[in-house]
Image (cartoon, rainbow, N blue to C red):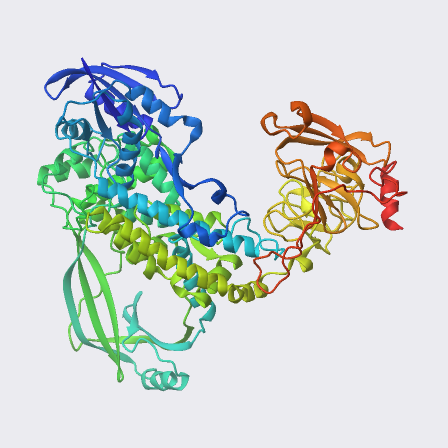
Amino acid sequence: MKTVLMVAEKPSLAQSIAKILSRGSMSSHKGLNGACSVHEYTGTFAGQPVRFKMTSVCGHVMTLDFLGKYNKWDKVDPAELFSQAPTEKKEANPKLNMVKFLQVEGRGCDYIVLWLDCDKEGENICFEVLDAVLPVMNKAPSGEKTVFRARFSSITDTDICSAMARLGEPDHNEALSVDARQELDLRIGCAFTRFQTKYFQGKYGDLDSSLISFGPCQTPTLGFCVERHDKIQSFKPETYWVLQAKVNTDKDRSLLLDWDRVRVFDREIAQMFLNLTKLEKEAQVEATGKKEKAKQRPLALNTVEMLRVASSSLGMGPQHAMQTAERLYTQGYISYPRTETTHYPENFDLKGSLRQQANHPYWADTVKRLLAEGINRPRKGHDAGDHPPITPMRSATEAELGGDAWRLYEYITRHFIATVSHDCKYLQSTISFRIGPELFTCSGRTVISPGFTEIMPWQSVPLEESLPTCQRGDTFPVGEVKVLEKQTSPPDYLTEAELITLMEKHGIGTDASIPVHINNICQRNYVTVESGRRLKPTNLGIVLVHGYYKIDAELVLPTIRSAVEKQLNLIAQGKADYRQVLGHTLDVFKRKFHYFVDSIAGMDELMEVSFSPLAATGKPLSRCGKCHRFMKYIQVGGSKGCDLTLPHWASTLSSVDPGFGGTGSGPRGQGAGGCHRAPLSLPGMGCNECTHPSCQHSLSLLGIGQCVECESGVLVLDPTSGPKWKVACNKCNVVAHCFENAHRVRVSADTCNVCEAALLDVDFNKAKSPLPGDETQHMGCVFCDPVFQELVELKHAASCHPMHRGGPGRRQGRGRGRARRPPGKPNPRRPKDKMSALAAYFV
């Protein structure tokens, strides 16, 4: 009996599909990776009895990355990443052993059916699975087809069985378009990110970001937010005046009239119109009108509209909303949630989907009436050729789903019912009045038929008072005429819903990636989410966008990314060559990168305005041992270092720049770590100067001996620098690189008999141990021990990053050799008690 391997995108999907196809008669067991299950049953395939094995992956099997040294920031010029740096496919999650798992399950199989999600990413995963499985499958007779692709839009019996009955082939062109996008984003994003991160990090103390990232989609997304911010900042309010009149229709009722001129921007002119009308006692009816109007039911629901409503009405961020929708889909409650289509195909079973809701406690009456009277065909929308619009596939209750899942499901279901309902119809009445020479109008609405607003009440026509019955020539007493002074107001910050609309309009990202890009600019501290889910750019986000505009506006404008997306779509359609698109796009961005590097001083000037140089914000050698950010010295009362409290007499030490190090030589410069867990220190003191006897990061436990160059400094071990261990002076810029690839370096309580320096206990990697006789552990003095002398390299830390144009570069090291302590100098690292430590600093 032959074997058919079937692979879904997620374990829950595999179980649901297998349960439908096997009609519940299947056996299940965990796979070797512990994350994916295997469901087995017997059936027929291609007219013959077979054994089915249904399993899954967990998203992408492979990810794209650079090889070897190109993954190390300090080893490679970022410009090389555009063309010279080779890439490879690596396992996306090595802990899952997904490739080995697929090979074990695929070994000896005769056919494979791919049940991955039916979008471009799903097609790409299809070929990742095939790369792993095809080499271990049984060889097929010449010409026999062994690879099949199932295409489906929902986890229902009808859709799954229909997909199994009409299997196709995976789309290689769509998979290539994803490969191209991955490589473009990797090469472009890494090159710009590495350069600007290394350039600015360590240069500005209050630049609160460990990674200053650039992304071909992320950056234009941020650009939309900053553009709105700039409009708000540059907005100048204008004063204007409005004439407002009231007429009395009876003793207890009056109508508020709108001025036909709307507003004027000159006070004297407004006063003139007031003078012309305020003495009038009656308002004469000039015209009346009634017109029946309709408010259209919504188009069928696609991903972008779902995300917009989730953010604006449900208070759910796009990323969270997308994850919630995916869970509802895998559980079989809704159809596939990633679609650009707003048009139902002619053969879609609308009545069948509606019948599923006929007994729901919230909308059963509306559904039954629609089924009895006949549903209204949904409006004709856009057919993107991917999946049908998002549709509820089975009924669910609030108790069954709960929380955000229920709120999103309820909206999706109400939206679907609304699409097959009738339009809302209402009667709009208007009356035009003349008061003196000026015309005024009032209007009212009366609902004739609520239509779809019955199921979507938040879309209903606002209730308004009915207008009095009157005709041309009738008069009403004027109650009041006055001038109101008002001001124009600036636009508000973009909401997530508005940003999603802009991204869709300009072709930035896909329906699946839009939530990711918005989440990225929030996570990278480029924007903050304010009340009403409005996105307010931070100083860093504003400076970056303004810097891109100053250097090369196309880096932040949506135009170039939109053009790239169009080329990627042409690859997916088989109309463009993958290599040509990739090569051309990388060449364009490589030229832009070189220009950006040459012009970085322009962005640096903007940084200087918004952020403070490191020297002005805190001592460069003062790093927090908990969060590894620079600690800022601030003259205030109560105090904090990251979230760890200091005593009241100490100054505030706030973490302002990530990355462990010291003098601003890039992400990992000179310095020793510290922590405020045991805050026995003086204001402005770094943790590598603190002498608290029990703190694991203090000078007392990590100090080694007198600095070889300065009079007052102590060489201190950086406990976070492994596997490239460092010892640095806590006063000057001397740094010693030592014991590379050692597992552990510990400062011993024992001291050297010759120079009184603390001994170091070093445990090396067995495969890379430099010790004689294949030994892995050695204790000795860094100054006197001949074994350690060849393992220590003394250098000066750079005072400025070498990529900072016009600044000093890295000074040359002094080469390998023995680091000697000047004779006759005692070891100052361990004072006898706390008070002696403090006293030493007060002298």
Q: Nearer the viewer, residue 240 or 109?
A: 109
Which residue is found at the position 40% from the left and 77% from the top?
240
Q: Is residue 507 visible?
A: no
The quadrant in which residue 816 appears is: top right
Q: Could you say where residue 247 lies in the image, as x and y percent from the top left?
A: 29, 72
Position of 177 relative to 24 (above/below)? below
Count of numbered tags = 0
Q: Is residue 500 visible?
A: yes
Which residue is found at the position 22% from the left and 25% from the top?
112
Q: Could you say where residue 693 lies in the image, as x and y percent from the top left?
A: 80, 35
Q: Nearer the viewer, residue 162 or 242?
A: 162
Quadrant location of the N terminus in the rendered image: top left
Q: Could you say where residue 19 lies in the image, as x and y percent from the top left?
A: 24, 20
**Taking 633 as reference, is 37 left or right?**
left
The quadrant in which residue 281 appears is: bottom left
Q: Nearer the viewer, residue 837 or 224?
A: 837
**Taking 789 as reference, is 155 left or right?**
left
Direction front: furthest residue: 773
Position of 26 relative to 17 (above/below)? above
**Taking 161 as reference, is 532 left or right?**
right
Q: Could you say where residue 567 lies in the image, as x and y percent from the top left?
A: 26, 54
